[in-house]
Structure formats: structure tokens, C-alpha cells
């Protein structure tokens, strides 16, 4: 006969706060609520944490602690399938406050390495939603973050994720694809390379890719709609500044109410429209009137 460890070779977590100090696989057995501390602390390498569809919540009267704290210098981690819920709200004047967690999933100081977050939703945190930094091998996929007072999601690679109602940069990664980021003050989507992404900001740039943007849309009320070193099949919209700004633009279009619709050094098969400013500013253009 098989032992219980052979049938279910994982460690259950049924109370919080809980510290994971041994490598292995762990899973929640119920919803867990803390009143002012970190809910789960990962303190060792080689951990897989299955939230199992349950929720980590906090009733701290002033937002504090982490839902999942990753200690410094760790690697080879996986967290997936669950929810993190705080009570922080957007006051409507650019500030966030309220009860619950300060951070959703994040490192204490240093970002982890070789870490993957999949299928996790985070809401109502005072600072970060999912913050893994962009310098290490980290992946965030199929995650949702809403109403956070700092960065929404940061990781080396971000796929198929959504961030809304974020005070600072909504999505920040090296490689970002099939994702949607909405920021109130910062950048909607900030990446080295962005593909099939939507970024919007009330005050900052809608979408900014310092290498390439492909099949992307960026919109803003006060800055550049979409910026990329090389943009292909992209659209930028701004009610105040430049619609789309790029060194090389291919098959792109930009609109601005009062600025330049499209600005590029080289443009091929592009168009720009402006209600009150120049439609376009292009040094070299091809397949265009």
C-alpha cells in the first residue's frame, strides 16, 4: 500500500501566518486571513506553492505586510492558481489608502531568480501587486491585478496579463506579450519588446517599448500615446502630445488632438492625424503621400 506522502506528496497550509522553510510542494486547504502580518513567507529555494483556488486576505486597518513575501536571494520558485485580496481603494485624487496588504507577491529587497507566477489575481494593495523585478529569470503569466498604489506587475517576461487602476507603471517587463495595462500616473505598458499589447495612462505614456512594439495600441490624455524605437502595425492616440513617436515606423498610425499625430525618422506605409497640430513629422518616408 502507498503511504499518504506517496499519494499526496505535498504539504498542506491551513493556517496563517505560515513560513515555508523547507524545499518542496505546498498547497492551501482553505481561505486564509491575517490581521497585520505577512500571510505566507517563502524562506528557501525550490518551492512550489499552489493556492488551490483559495484567497489570501488581510484585515490590517492600515495596509501592511505581504500576502506572499519572498526572502532575499531565493530561486526556483513557482506560485499559482489563487487570489490575493486587500481593502485598499483609489480615493480618486491619485492617492491610495485603506486596509489590507501593502504588497501582494514581492521580494523583501532583492528580486528572486527562476520564478514563475501563473493564474493569480491581486486586488487592493497599497504598493505592488506582483513585483519580481526585470533583471532575473522571472515569468508572470495569466495574472490579473487591480487597484494598487505602485507597480502592477513587474517581471522579465509577462504574458496574457491585465492590470487596471494602477498608480505607477501598470506593466513593466523586458518581454511583454498579449497584455493590457492601465495606469493613472505612470506608463501603461513599459517594455523592451511589446507584442499584441494595450497600454493607457491618464498622465504618463500609454505604451513605451525602447526596442520594438508590434501590433500594439497606446493611449494617453497628456503625454505620448505610443513610443517605440521600432514600431510595426501600431496605433498611438493622445489628446495633448504626440500620438505615435518612433525612430522606425512600419504600417503605423497616430492621432493627436493638439500635438503631432505621428513622428518618425523613417516611416513606411504610415499615417498621422491631428486636430490642431501637424499631422506628421517624418524625415524619410516610403509608400506615403
Image (tube, helix red, strand yellow):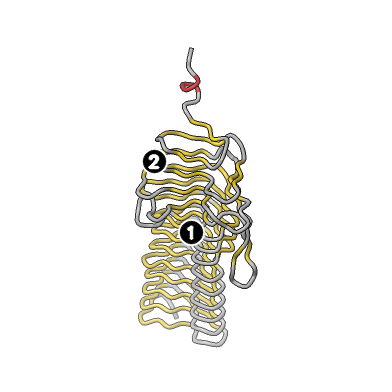
User: Is residue 262 visible to us here?
Assistant: yes
- Between label 2 and label 1, give the one nearer the viewer: 2
The percent coordinates of residue 169 (x first, y second) are: 49, 65
Residue 230 in the image: state x and y as whole percent: 38, 68
Q: Is residue 91 above or below residue 255?
A: above
Residue under the point 54% across and 81% down: 240
In the image, is residue 44 above or below residue 2?
below
User: At numbered mark 1, what does the secondary structure look like: helix, strand or loop?
Assistant: loop
Which residue is painted at 51% across and 57% down in the image? 179
Please tell me which residue lies in front, 272 or 80: 80
Left or right: 246 in relation to 55: left
- 147 relative to 243 in the view: left or right: right
Q: Earlier in the sequence, mark 2 or mark 1?
A: 2
User: What's the residue at 63%, 62% (across, down)?
Assistant: 89
Q: Which residue is mark 2?
A: 44
Instruction: Report x, y in % for residue 42.
Output: 44, 43
Q: Is residue 253 above or below residue 134?
A: below
Residue ID at (42%, 49%): 139
In three-dimensional space, the C-alpha distance between marks 2 and 1, rounded to whole angstroms, equals 36 Å
Check residue 196 in the rendering and tell me which mark sits there, or answer none: 1
In front of the other: 157 or 115: 115
Can see residue 235?
Answer: no
Location of residue 93 by image quarter: bottom right
Q: Residues within 10 Å of mark 1 (few under 14, many from 20)?
A: some
Quadrant housing residue 28: top right
**Element type where label 2 sits in the image:** loop
Q: Residues within 10 Å of mark 2 (few under 14, many from 20)?
A: many
Lateral position of residue 194 relative to residue 217, left or right: left
Viewer-closest of 2 and 139: 2
Amino acid at each position: 500500500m502507498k503511504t499518504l506522502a506517496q499519494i499526496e506528496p505535498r504539504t498542506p497550509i491551513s493556517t496563517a501566518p505560515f513560513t515555508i522553510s523547507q524545499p518542496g510542494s505546498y498547497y492551501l486547504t482553505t481561505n486564509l486571513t491575517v490581521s497585520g502580518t505577512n500571510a505566507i513567507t517563502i524562506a528557501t529555494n525550490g518551492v512550489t506553492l499552489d493556492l488551490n483556488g483559495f484567497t489570501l486576505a488581510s484585515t490590517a486597518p492600515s495596509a501592511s505586510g505581504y500576502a506572499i513575501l519572498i526572502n532575499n536571494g531565493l530561486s526556483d520558485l513557482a506560485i499559482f492558481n489563487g487570489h490575493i485580496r486587500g481593502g485598499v481603494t483609489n480615493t480618486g485624487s491619485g492617492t491610495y489608502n485603506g486596509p489590507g496588504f501593502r504588497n501582494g507577491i514581492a521580494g523583501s529587497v532583492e528580486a528572486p531568480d527562476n520564478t514563475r507566477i501563473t493564474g493569480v489575481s491581486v486586488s487592493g494593495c497599497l504598493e505592488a501587486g506582483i513585483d519580481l523585478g526585470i533583471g532575473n529569470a522571472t515569468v508572470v503569466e495569466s495574472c490579473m491585478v487591480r487597484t494598487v498604489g505602485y507597480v502592477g506587475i513587474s517581471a522579465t517576461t509577462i504574458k496574457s496579463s491585465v492590470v487596471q487602476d494602477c498608480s505607477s507603471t501598470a506593466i513593466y517587463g523586458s518581454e511583454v506579450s498579449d497584455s493590457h495595462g492601465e495606469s493613472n500616473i505612470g506608463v501603461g505598458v513599459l517594455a523592451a519588446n511589446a507584442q499584441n499589447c494595450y497600454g493607457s495612462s491618464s498622465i504618463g505614456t500609454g505604451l513605451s517599448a525602447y526596442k520594438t512594439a508590434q501590433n500594439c495600441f497606446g493611449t494617453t490624455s497628456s503625454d505620448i500615446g505610443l513610443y517605440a524605437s521600432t514600431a510595426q502595425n501600431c496605433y498611438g492616440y493622445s489628446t495633448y502630445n504626440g500620438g505615435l513617436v518612433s525612430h522606425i515606423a512600419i504600417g503605423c498610425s497616430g492621432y493627436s488632438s493638439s500635438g503631432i499625430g505621428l513622428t518618425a525618422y523613417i516611416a513606411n506605409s504610415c499615417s498621422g492625424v491631428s486636430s490642431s497640430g501637424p499631422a506628421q513629422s517624418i524625415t524619410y518616408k516610403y509608400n506615403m503621400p
